[in-house]
Image (cartoon, coloured by chain):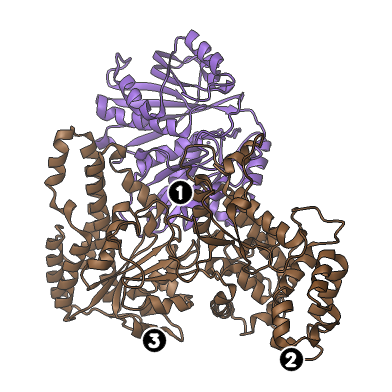
Amino acid sequence: MMPKGTPSIFDSFNARALNPGQVARTFVPPYQYQKLCLRRHSVLIGPRGSGKTTLLKMLTPAALNSWNHALAEHYRSQVDFTGIFIPTDLTWREQIESLGDGRLDPRDLQVLSRATVTTHVLRSLTTAVISRQAASTSGVGFRRLDLERERETRLSRQIANAWDLEVDLPSFTALKHALSLRLSRIRQLAGKVAELPASERAQTLGSRDYLFLDSLEAAVVAIELLDDAAGEQDSRWALMFDELELAPDWLQGELMSAMRSRDDRLILKLALSPYSGETPLFKTSSSAGPDQDYEEIPLWYAEKRNSYPFCRDLWFQMLRERGLPTVEPVEVLGRSVFETTPDEWKELGNAYAPSGRIGRRFKEAAQRDASFLRYLEVNRLDPARLHTLSGNERAASVRKIAPLVAVREFYRTSDLDLRAATRSRKRPTLFAGADSLFAISEGNPRWFIAIIGRLLDTLSGVGARISDSKQAIEMQHAADRFAAMLSILPVRDRAGAKAPKLYDVISQIGDYFYKRAVTDDFSPEPPLTFFVDNSVGDNVLLMLGVALNAGAIVYVPDGSSRLILNDCRGSRFRISYLLTPIFGLPIRLGPPISLSSILPRPRAGSDEQQLRLMS
Amino acid sequence: MEYPTVVREMTPGKRAEYDVFIAAVGYERRARYVVQELQPEASRKLGIGFEDRQVFEYSNNREILTRRGYRVEVVADGDLLEWLEREMMKGPLRERDRIRVGVDISSFSRFRIAAIVHALRRVPRLLHKLCVAEFYYSVALFSKPPKSAGPNIVVGPVAHYFAGWTTRPDLPLAAVLGLGYEEDKALGAFEHVQASARWLVRPISIDHRFDTAVTNANRRLLEGTPAGRVLGYCVSDPLGCFGIVESLVFGLTRDYNIIVLPFGPKPFALCSLLVACIHPSVAVWRVSAGGFEDPKDQKASGNVYGLQVEFNYPEEGNRGGPSGCNGGDDSTD
C-alpha cells in the first residue's frame, strides 16, 4: 500500500490543483526559473510533470507575494512584470470545439472560439489585478496595487466599457463575474446559432460586438487604463499560456506571430510539451524564431548530471517539509555503483585496486564473461592492475566502461545461462544510491517527489539509511506504474488502422538496448540512444510524439537542434531512465542507432503486429 | 443548456406499453433478451443495427426482432441523432401531453446511449410534449475480461453535446471514473486527461467474480486513491447509481471542473449522461479502441433493471433524487 501523504507518479497533486500561494509554499527554483524571470518572451518546454505549470504560477503576483525562500527576494527583484496565468486543459479544448453541439460551420465556430478564449484571457488578467490588490494587505506587497474605492470603480467602469461588459456596481471582482457570465452566454449563443437557418447565423453573431474583441488588444487597453490609474509608466505584463499545444490552433499561430510584432508592453511566456505534432506552432514563416524573438527553456535533462543540483535542492526541501535534519542524500541513500567518488580516486587502495569495488568487479566479470575477457586482453587491461594506470588512461579505458560492466555483471549469470534478450525480473538493487535515484527521477519534480517521498516516509529515524532493497522496490514500483500507464495511453491513429500499443514500441527499443548492452558480446559503447530515420512509419512517429510528451523517451538535441519538434524524424532520443529497472540498462547516454534497425521489419509471412509496427 | 430531468425507480415488467421502443440489433445474444422475455409493446418498435461487426448473433437478433414487429434499420453513428429525432416526431401518441419511450441500452455503445439521451431530452422542445423514457438494462453473465485490450484510440467527449462547459476554466479538473474490468484502462484515461483529483465509482455485483475482476483490473489506480474517494454502486440499482454520481458531481462543482469517464456497466454511463443533463458543465468522455476491440458474445444473466426518466420543458425543471445488488459489466464502448 502507498504510504500516507505521498502521491504516486500519476497523482496529479500537481500545480494545476494548487493556487499560487500553495505552489509557493513548497517551490524549489530550478536554474530555468532564473531565465524565465527575465523580461523577454520565453517558451518553456517539457514533458508532463516537468514543472511547467509550477514555474508559470511562480511568476504570478500572488505566488511571488507569498513566497518564503532564501532566494525569494532575489527573484522578486528580477521579475519586473505582472504575470497573468492562463490555464488550458484537454477538456476545455474539447468544449470549445464542441460549441453548438458540433453543428456550427467552421467560420461561426471560430468566431465563438475566439470570443471564448478572449474572455478567458481577460478573466485571467482580472484575476491577476485582484491578486495585486490583495498584496496590499498580505504577503510582502509584491507589485501591490493600491487603488481607492472610487478610483477602482471608475477604472472598472472604463474597462467594462472597453470590453463591452455590463456591470452594475463596477469593481474588479464584478468584472471577473461578468466575464464568467459571458462565457456562459457564449455557450447559449452557440446553441442558439446552431439551430438557426444558415442565412441568419452571420447576422446573429455580427450583432454582438464583444464576440470580435481581440484578446491581446483588449488586454493592452485595460493595461493602459490600469497603468494610468496606478501611476505606473512603461509597466510590463506577461501573458502566460500553459499547455499551449492544447489551445485552439488559431491561438497558437497568433501567439507565435505575436512574439515578433505585438505591443512591447506584453511579454509572452508559453509552456508546451516537446512534441507539438500537427499543431501550427512554429510552422508559418511569420512565426517567431528562437534566440532573436524568444528564448527556449527546456525542462528536461538529456545528460543526467545536469539534473543533480535541482534534485539535491528538492531533496533538502523535502527533508525540511518532513522536519528531518539536513543530511546529504548519499548518507541516507548510499552511493550509486555508477559513481566513483574523489576518495576512491585518491587512495592507493582505491576502487580500482584488486580488492577495490571496481577492480573486483572487473575481475569477476572477466571470469564469467568471455567476451569481456577478450576485450580486456585486446586492450591490454589487467583487472589486477587497474590501479596502476594513470588518471587519464583510467578515464579513457576503464572508467567509461565501469557502469556497463556493473550492469552486465548484475544481469548476466554466466555465458551459458544467458537467454537472449530476455529481461531479468531481478530486484534492481543495482540502481540504488543517491545519484542513480536522481537520474531515474529525470529531474522531473513529480517523479522525484513520488519516489523519494515514499522512501522518506519509511525512514526510521535520524541517522538511518534506506536499504538498497527498499530503494529497488520503490523504483520498480514507479517503473511498473509508468509502464502500465504507457500501455493504455491513448494514441490517435492517423490512418484509422489498428496501431500497436505505445508501450509495445518502447519495450522493443528497451529490449534491443538490453540485448546489445547485456547479453551480446561485450562492446564498450553499445547503442543506448536512437535516431528516427526516414524508414519509420507514420504510426510509430505519432507514438514517439506521445511518448516524448509523456516522458517515456527523452529528446537528446545536439547544439543546433530546435527544442520543439513537430516531427521526430532526424532527432535523437533515449529511453527514460525511469524505465531502467524494467529494461536493465546502464544509466548513461550511449551512441545512437537508427530506429528502423531496432523495430522489426515487415517481411513475407511476418505476423500482423510486425507489419503494423512499421506501417 | 440545463435540461430539467427527473429520475425515478423503475422495475421492468412484462408487456409495458410505449409509443416508441428502441432496441439495439447487436452481435451479442443479450441484445434480444428484453425484447424476447419482457415483450414490450409499442406503436413503433425500432431496432437499430450497426454498420460494422455484424458477427456472432447479429443475424439471429435481426431476424428475431423483425419477427416481433421491429423495424430494423442500420443507422450510422453520424446519422443517429437526426434519425432518432425524426422517429420521435412521428405520431400518433397514446397520451396527448407526453411521449412514452422505452429503450434497452444493454447492447448500445456509449456513443449511441448518449445520442438517445440527447434526442430524448430535446423532445419536449421539438414536440412540445413531456418525454417519459424507461431504460432497460439486461445484465450479462460473467465472462473473463479480455487479456489484452486494443490500444486506446478514441478519446474525447462521448458526443459533442456532452462535452460540458465551464465558466471558470481556471478551476482544477476532477475526474469521476466509473470502473470496469479492463486492465488499467481507467488509469490510462485518468493520466491522459491529467485531472488534479479523482473519485472512483466501482460497480458491486451479485456475482463476485465481477468485483474481483474490477479490483484486479484497477489495482494500481485503487492503490493510490484514498478510501474516502472510492465509492460503490450496485449494478442492480440504477437509481442508486444515479444518486451517487449526482451527489458527487453536485458536491464537486464548486471547486472543480468535472469530467466523468464511464467505464464499466452501462447503467453508469447512462447515469453519467443524465447527471450531465442536470449539470451541463460536466463533461462525459469515452476512451476506446475505436471499434478495434474484439467483439464478444455476451449472454444475458436473466436480471434486468430499469430507470424511469422524465425530460421536462426547460422552464419546468426539477431534480430527481436517489433511492436502492446484482451484477454485470460491459466492456464494449
**Element class at badge 3:** helix
**Residue A506, x across and y down, in percent:** 61, 53
Which residue occupies the extreme bottom position in the image?
A347
Amino acid at circle 2? Lys
**In this structure image, what is the colour of chain B?**
purple
**Residue B65, x across and y down, in percent:** 49, 13
On screen, residue B158 above or below A545: above
Residue at 37%, 59% in the rendered image? A244
Nearest to the observer: residue B309 or residue B76? B76
Amino acid at circle 3? Glu
Instruction: Name the residue beneath numbered marker 1.
Output: B248
Gap between marks 1 and 2 measured at Cα: 64 Å
Instruction: Name the residue beneath numbered marker 2.
Output: A346
Place residue B309 in its image quadrant.
top left
Gap between marks 3 and 1 measured at Cα: 43 Å
Residue at 41%, 29% in the rendered image? B77
Subunit of label 1: B
> Quick one: label 2, few (<14), some, or many (20+) residues within 10 Å?
few
Q: Say left or right for A290 vs A471.
A: left
Quadrant in the picture for the N terminus of chain A? bottom right
**In this structure image, what is the colour of chain A?**
brown
Amino acid at circle 1? Leu
